[in-house]
Image (cartoon, rainbow, N blue to C red):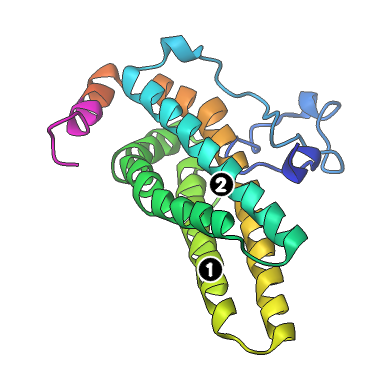
Amino acid sequence: MTNARKLKVIDPVTPQATVTAADKGELSPMDPPDAYAPPGNVDVPVEDLHPFLRGLIEEYVVLKAHVGDFEECLTFLQKERGLSRDAHERLNRFFQVFDQEFARHDRKEERDLFPLLRIRLLEKGEHSPTQVTGADVLQSEHVEMRKAVTTVGALLSAIPILEDVPSREILLDAAIGTGKEFVEKINLHIFREDEVMLPLEHTLLTTEELDAIGRHYSPGSAS
């Protein structure tokens, strides 16, 4: 169980401004809802989701397995204070997958889904006073996670060229810490996508719109 699951935070992806006075007996600023138990999310069974959205969920199943392998490597690094050949190869494999598969998945959302979803959320009034929607939050998380993985890779690459042992230890701890933060963020991000945003996209976007997006990413098309 991740630390994020243990913490209770205000989740910016789910609407918080719609809480009424009648809800105050259940929700309190001193005891906000668990990010892994968002209030008022749309309940759509996976099998009822549009095929394109189901495809995104299936992609996340594969990507989560790579995240788990990455987390195991971080645990090894923390314990052994150095990279074995196997851990080095596994980390390189994760970085390659992140650069290719994660990036491909993110492009589908950032180019097609998020902009359209943002329009619909604004129309429904589900946004912050500064018109920040759940789609904006998820897109910003994509950027944060890309920066985190880039930072981990840069720190690990710099360690072998340092002769000073204390400096190597500092970089190693920084890489492990940043990597663990990334794991926490992406696990929560995937949960929000699967449980909140994809059902919302299925509800707010038309079948024709989702069909058009799906055709854009079908085999043989330029994506």
On residue 15, the disc is none
In the image, which is nearer the foreground, mark 1 or mark 2?
Answer: 1
Residue 157 placement, left or right of 205: right
Q: Quadrant of residue 182?
A: bottom right
Q: Residue furthest front?
A: 85
Mark 2 — residue? 128
Confirm whether the magenta stretch covers residue 218. yes
Residue designated by label 1 = 151
80 or 129: nearer the viewer: 80
Question: Picture coordinates of residue 110 (x, y %)?
Answer: 35, 46
Query: Residue 135 in the image: x percent, y percent?
Result: 46, 42
Q: Secondary structure at mark 1?
A: helix
Start and end of the magenta stretch? 212-223
Pick the quarter of the image with the N terminus.
Answer: top right
The answer to whether residue 93 is seen in the rendering is yes
Image point 69% across, 63% down: which residue? Answer: 177
- Amino acid on which disc 1 is placed: Thr
How many discs appear?
A: 2
* Residue 13: quadrant of the picture: top right
Q: Nearer the viewer, residue 214 or 202?
A: 214
